[in-house]
Image: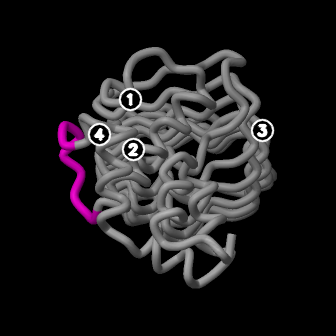
Amino acid sequence: MERLNRDELILIAMNLDYPEILSMCNSHPRNNQAICRNDTFWFNKLRRDFPNYQAYNIDGTHRDIYKKIYGISDIKRKWNLDGSLLDIYNRRQFSLGSDQISIIPETIGNLSNLQYLYLYNNNITKIPESIGNLSNLQTLSLENNQIREVPESIGNLSNLQSLSLDNNQIREIPVTIGNLTNLEYLYLYNNNITEIPESIGNLSNLQSLWLHNNQIREVPESIGNLSNLQVLILSDNQIREVPDSMGNLTNLQDFWLRNNPVREVPESVRNIPGLNFRL
């Protein structure tokens, strides 16, 4: 391929898919200059492979646009989706529960219009970092999978209102969870979590927090900052002490603490008006 001239390289690349083009560019600096750093090449490639590319209203260079649309085709293929690429890009909701998928493609972050993502009851083992690019996402439902780790990028989902990660194999809640200030419902029960991060206290709109059947040993003082919390389920953990700050949760209606080695619960908590407390 070193003997080919520039036009011949471009002709070959025009018939390759995106990963093959990147591999070709990485194989030699001359290829990179002639193809990957050539905006005219990407413009022509876009017009040929995705003639309606302007309908996507994607900002960036022609290469950026090509990469994003190609990523949508990757999702379509891996999830066996119906509809055109443009239809998939414009979708506000995906519901692929009950053994339909086993992977979330890294290119999921290209679906910038997505608001509701339901992927429960599957065999998913990993959440890609790119999930944090879904800036319009309001609901993320990943319960009943095989997920072990939650990426730090989850904290970028500034519009998220409901997060369901129960019935997985998660060991740690990332500190960045505290960035989700619009979150109202958080379900993390039936996992292997050992610690609640202090940043949980930043979730000023949180109404319901379910963390039962984990390995949690301590409740952070910051939990008393959750002024809108109505439901707190901490049963079946290893909690020995409840912080006095929980007395500040004046909107709390249900607090379950059964099957924990708790020695005593502060009077300030027991005296919350109308509280349904189960020890």
Q: Give the amino acid type for the residue marked by disc 3 in the picture.
A: Gln
Rendered position, 207 above or below 92: below
From the viewer's perspective, tell me whether residue 272 is left or right of residue 267.
Answer: left
Rendered position, 80 above or below 181: above
Mark 3–mark 1 distance (CA, rounded to whole Å): 29 Å
Q: Which residues are magenta?
A: 54-61
Instruction: Give the number of the mark in front: 3 or 2.
Output: 2
Q: Are marks 4 and 1 in contact (CB under 8 Å)?
A: no
Q: Residue at x 39, y 44 (%)?
A: 69
| Front residue (pair 56, 192) | 56
Q: Secondary structure at mark 1?
A: helix
| Front residue (pair 121, 195) | 121
Q: Give the amino acid type for the residue marked by disc 1 in the picture.
A: Leu
x then y, percent, for residue 29: 58, 84
- Answer with mark 3 or mark 2, whichever residue precedes in sequence: 2
x then y, percent, for residue 113: 29, 39
- Answer with mark 2 or mark 4, whichever residue precedes in sequence: 2
Mark 2–mark 1 distance (CA, rounded to whole Å): 8 Å
Bin the neighbour count of mark 2 within 10 Å (Cα to Cα): few under 14, some 14-19, many 20 and up.
many
Give the residue at mark 2: 69
| Front residue (pair 156, 223) | 156
Q: Which mark is residue 85?
A: 1
Bin the neighbour count of mark 4 within 10 Å (Cα to Cα): few under 14, some 14-19, many 20 and up.
some
Instruction: Give the number of the mark in front: 3 or 1.
Output: 1
Q: Are marks 2 and 1 in contact (CB under 8 Å)?
A: yes
Mark 2–mark 4 distance (CA, rounded to whole Å): 13 Å
Give the residue at mark 3: 146
From the viewer's perspective, tell me whether residue 250 is left or right of residue 220.
Answer: left
Q: Secondary structure at mark 4?
A: loop
Is 56 one of the magenta-colored residues? yes
From the viewer's perspective, tell me whether residue 33 is left or right of residue 103.
Answer: left
Q: Residue at x 34, y 48 (%)?
A: 46
